[in-house]
Amino acid sequence: MKDAVTAADLRRKKSTGEKIAFLTAYDYPTAALVDAAGMDAILVGDSVGMAVMGRENTLSVTMDVMVHHTAMVARAVKRALVVADMPFLSYHTGPEDAVRHAGRLVGEAGAHAVKLEGPVDQFGDCIRAILRAGIPVMGHVGLTPQSILHFGGFKVQGRDEADARRIKAAALALEEAGCFAVVLECVPAALAADITAVLSIPTIGIGAGAACDGQVLVMHDILGWGKTRFAKTFGDARTVMAEAFAGYVKEVKAGEYPGPEHGYP
Ligand code: KIV
């Protein structure tokens, strides 16, 4: 499509100073709305496990789940860049699996790029192999939810100097490996600002302050389901939906719905 956003466009936005708006989506109707709102990029995150599937974390999300949801989103989107998450254990076993799985997200499901978590010293060979296959890769550092068992919970990362240095080095290494952007999740705002200043690729923050080149949030967290400090309710869809469901129950029970106008003569 002529006006479709590309990974290269996101890199250009960093040089022009235009902030990047990024949000998750997991299905056809909501992805169509997100796209029509003018979002630059849509992430089919493995957060689907928590936001949609009712799981405690993202570790049980499989490739088949990611392909299923990415395909729904990609069918709906006309303009935004569709980025699909590589789920837990889809790249940890080596470059061959990484390329095959990234290829499924792009070829089978229709994503335009993939995102994977973790440092280059562990997954650099996977990142380079996916790039060689012609698939743009986005990195992710800070709180990487697939390492939740290692971190011992969803905790802010990079608070002490050594950890901050490690995260900054990881972000720089992702740029060097060829990633077109990097997510900074749950790190102090000053650290995110420092990383944003030294990287030539865009930083996309989530709980990482205002200095990042863009922001990404989980859709449900802006619609009234958010429980985190960094999320903001931009519209209370949760209440609107709850009221609609209760209204339907009430009218069916009272015999008020359906009216004559809802039936066939
Ligand atoms: O899975 C996801 O939604 C993510 C964002 C939180 C960045 O990785």
Image (cartoon, helix red, strand yellow):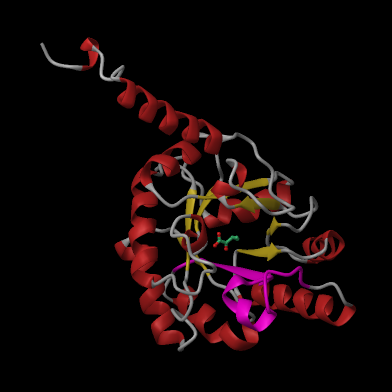
Name the spot of residue 247 as percent of width and height, x first: 42, 26
Q: Is residue 145 above or below residue 18?
A: below
Question: Residue drawn 41% across and 74% down?
Answer: 133
Question: Depth check: 216 or 111 in front?
Answer: 216
**Above-or-below relation of 4 to 87:** above
Residue at the limit of the structure toward the front, as seen here: 254
Location of residue 207 (image quadrant):
bottom right
**What residue occupies the far left of the structure in this picture?**
265
- Is residue 138 rendered to the left or right of residue 201? left
The magenta segment is: 135-157
Task: Decide whether residue 147 is among the magenta residues.
Answer: yes
The residue drawn where x is 68% and y is 51% is 214
- Residue at 72% x, 53% y is 213
In the image, taking residue 168 as reference, residue 54 lies left or right, namely left
Quadrant containing the N terminus is: top left
Residue 261 pos. (x, y %): 23, 11
Magenta run includes residue 53: no
In x, y percent, where is residue 119? 64, 80
Relative side of 11 to 211, left or right: left
Q: Residue at x 85, y 72 (%)?
A: 159
Instruction: State the count of labels.
Output: 0
Viewer can see residue 252: yes
Q: Considering only vertical position in the picture, is 21 above or below 123?
A: above
Closer-to-camera residue (229/160)? 229
Image quarter where the C terminus lies is top left
